[in-house]
């Protein structure tokens, strides 16, 4: 990591630490203290190290500080706090049920633990609905639409004749 990136990470960390609300990442997020490109690299670095996280994964432009590192005074200390945590341990694991762990930080700052259970997947068959089959799609529905259009035109013609004649 370059010295510029270290200082940018420190600025981003301190800004997250002093802010009560999540940080919105736009061009003026750090008020000219670091460039936008360098702040984006610092954000990516801190997210990869689980020091900051996105409360809503769909909107990655808003980030918050991981509550587990709130007591740290610098980025290096926060990194040590995150590295020393044991996210999850599997006490008993059978041979037919392997566990896969996802160590992403969620909204509350706690770890999500996703276990994938091995086994035979359930077969799901998807059949086309009756009204989406090609016969209906290309012939029956267009014929019905033409008949409905003709009926509407005939009714409007009758109404026009009643009004003016």
Image (tube, grey):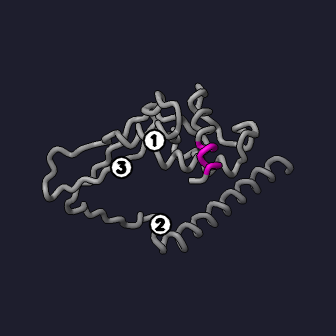
- SS for dot 3: loop
Label annotation for residue 102: 3
- SS for dot 2: helix
Q: Circle 2 sits on which residue? A: 132
Report the side of 33 relative to 148 (left or right). right
Mark 1 or mark 2, whichever is nearer to me: 1
Badge 1: few (under 14), some or many (20 or more) residues near its Cα, within 10 Å?
some
The residue closer to the viewer here, 125 or 15, is 15
**Marks 2 and 3 close (CB-CB < 8 Å):** no
Of helix, strand and loop, which mostly describes the magenta segment? helix
Q: Residue at x 29, y 54 (%)?
A: 100
The region drawn magenta spans 3-9
Q: Circle 1 sits on which residue? A: 79
Could you tell which of marks 3 and 1 lies nearer the N-terminus?
1
Mark 3 or mark 1, whichever is nearer to me: 1
Could you tell which of marks 1 and 2 lies nearer the N-terminus?
1
Badge 3: few (under 14), some or many (20 or more) residues near its Cα, within 10 Å?
few
């Amino acid at each position: 990591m370059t010295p510029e990136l270290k200082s940018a990470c420190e600025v981003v960390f301190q800004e997250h630490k002093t802010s009560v609300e999540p940080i919105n990442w736009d061009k003026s997020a750090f008020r000219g203290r670091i460039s936008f490109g360098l702040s984006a690299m610092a954000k990516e670095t801190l997210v990869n190290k689980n020091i900051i996280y996105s409360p809503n994964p769909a909107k990655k432009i808003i980030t918050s500080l991981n509550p587990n590192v709130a007591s740290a005074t610098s980025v290096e200390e926060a990194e040590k706090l995150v590295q020393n945590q044991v996210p999850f341990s599997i006490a008993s694991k059978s041979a037919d049920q392997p566990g896969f762990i996802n160590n992403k930080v969620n909204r509350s700052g706690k770890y999500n633990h996703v276990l994938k259970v091995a086994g035979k997947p359930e077969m799901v068959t998807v059949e086309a609905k009756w009204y989406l089959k090609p016969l209906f799609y290309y012939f029956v529905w267009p014929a019905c639409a033409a008949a409905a259009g003709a009926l509407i035109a005939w009714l409007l013609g009758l109404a026009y004749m009643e009004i003016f004649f």
